[in-house]
Image (tube, helix red, strand yellow):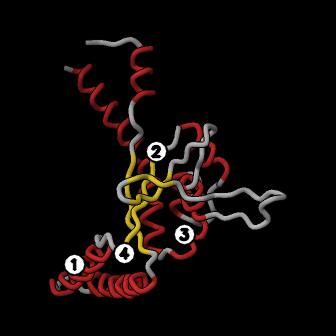
Amino acid sequence: MTTSFSEQLAEAKAAPRPHKDVPVIINTAAAEKRAALEEQLERAKDAADRDQRLSKSDDKVDAIQKQIDELLGDESITTTLRFYRLPGRSWSALTVMYPRRQGVQIDNTIGYNIDLVCEAAAQFIDEKKRPYGFRLEDGEEVALVVQRKSPKIENPLNEWSDLYSVLSGYEIVQIRDVIWELNDYGPRQELDELVKSFGAATRS
């Protein structure tokens, strides 16, 4: 049954925003173990790329990746971060705020600095003071503390900045890719599929 524009708009506004979760490790000992495994993984991948004939190389990559997955799956040492899709105009504003870096292929492809845009999106707070990035504690969403400098707060706390400073490059890339997929790649794929479906329907 066809619905009116107003009805579709109201339904879209009421729909829950898409979100994705990312496990990270800030436990010092576990983080060191994770970093060592990530180095082993990169070496194993390089070895596998050099000799595609040897299945043993691929087996080693899979074995190391399994250890990393098991480490990230241990809830006693991991912190789960949750990110929601930003309002479209807010995401668009961030992509203008952080222009692409010259000589960086991915930036030249998408048109903006993907690292800074996604880091800003992680700690984005809208005009109603609603954050779009959280950590989970016993299944509950907890906003990270981000203070603004003022006469009363000379050294403001920014838990997002502190968190990024202790995460591995692997985890930062995971966070970046999840946020980018939520706000850019995912919506583009959804629109492409809609256009394809519409085209198929008009031809039938």
Tell me the distance, in whole angstroms, between the alpha carbons under discs 3 and 1.
28 Å
Residue 38 numbered tag: none
Tell me the distance, in whole angstroms, between the alpha carbons under discs 1 and 2.
31 Å
Q: Residues within 10 Å of mark 1 (few under 14, many from 20)?
A: some
Tell me the distance, in whole angstroms, between the alpha carbons under discs 4 and 2.
27 Å
Q: Is residue 110 left or right of residue 22?
A: right
Task: For mark 1, give the secondary structure.
Answer: helix
Nearer the viewer's eye, disc 1 or disc 4? 4
Q: Which tag, 4 or 2, sits closer to the chain's start?
A: 4
Residue 62 numbered tag: 1
Residue located at (22% from left, 85% from top): 60
Check disc 3 and report the residue beneath it. Answer: 163
**Residue lying furthest right in this view?**
151
Query: Which one is in front, 152 or 40?
Result: 152
Question: Residue 93, how many percent across, how many down?
Answer: 63, 43
Q: Residues within 10 Å of mark 2 (few under 14, many from 20)?
A: many
